[in-house]
Image: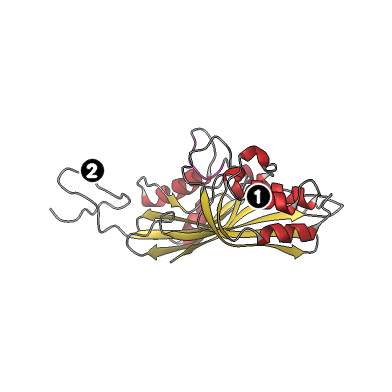
Amino acid sequence: MGACTHPGFGACTEPGIGACTDSPTTRLTIAYDGAAFAGWARQPGLRTVAQTLEAAIERILREPLALAVAGRTDRGVHAWGQVASYRHEALDPRALNALLPADVAVLASEPAPAGFDARRSATSRCYCYRVLAGALRSPFEEGRALWVPWLRDRDALHACAALLPGIHTFTAFTPTETDHVRFERRVIAARWEERGDVLEFWIEADAFMRQMNRVLVGTMLEVARGRRSIEDFAALLGGAPRRDAGPTVAPHGLYLARVSYG
């Protein structure tokens, strides 16, 4: 028999048909406020980004599908430029957004090359963590940035970020109980940007481990507070245990900014 024409599935289960080869692939660019989501991945009985998006798409296509995603963000983490993909035709973002709640939006929906997968095809991800480093809190940054009124040494933050580009072993920056089997990551770029009282930590890497960015920020803030040295931070990048690094800061300051391909 010829190629399967059942869209939405990577491999057809109909006997004698084999892999579906002619289904189009769609790439979505998505933004969301993670405050009311239990993360990206589907979890029984919980509101997740994947469940919310898949439900909207399925209402239009009238068939089930599963989204591949570039970065599985945790509970409370936001996204400016998350990327997902699925095997079916592209839909009008306006039609999708009409079915989505106010805290998630599809920014683009476009045909992707054959074989494209939002996770496996990605070459790097870029995250931003926002810190409000002022004596007074701001109602406009509530739930958007971590308020740190005691920050003393901004130069220490820049010095720590300068140590990150390259290949390091990040066991100190992810929970001890983990499914990860590879702890080396290649950091392409890392820097702190200052926008008045708002400090932004930008980091781009080939891939990230669970809570990695939040532990990096928590540890760098300890250096800026004078609780550990820059040399101590540098030593952590050689495969130190999790207990040697700093705290995991709150998720509401973290944003998946963009994903790069090819």
Q: For mark 2, what is the residue? A: 13
Residue 195's quadrant in the figure?
bottom right
Say if the magenta span includes residue 25: no
Residue on which disc 1 sits? 235
Residue 137 rendering spot, x and y as whole percentages: 83, 50
Whether tag 2 and tag 1 are in contact, CB under 8 A, the answer is: no
Q: Residue furthest top?
A: 45
The three-letter amino acid code for the residue at tag 1 is Ala
* Amino acid at pointer 2: Thr
Number of callouts: 2
Highlighted range, magenta: 39-43
At a point 25% along the width and 53% down the height, the residue shown is 20
SS class of the residue under badge 2? loop
Sequence-first disc among 2 and 1: 2
Q: Nearer the viewer, residue 5 or 217?
A: 217
Quadrant of the rendered structure where residue 247 is? Answer: top right
* Element type at mark 1: helix
Residue drawn at point x = 57 percent, y = 48 percent: 170
If the image is split into quadrants, where does the C terminus sit? Answer: bottom left
What is the basis of the colouring in this image? Answer: secondary structure
What type of secondary structure mainly makes up the magenta span?
A: loop
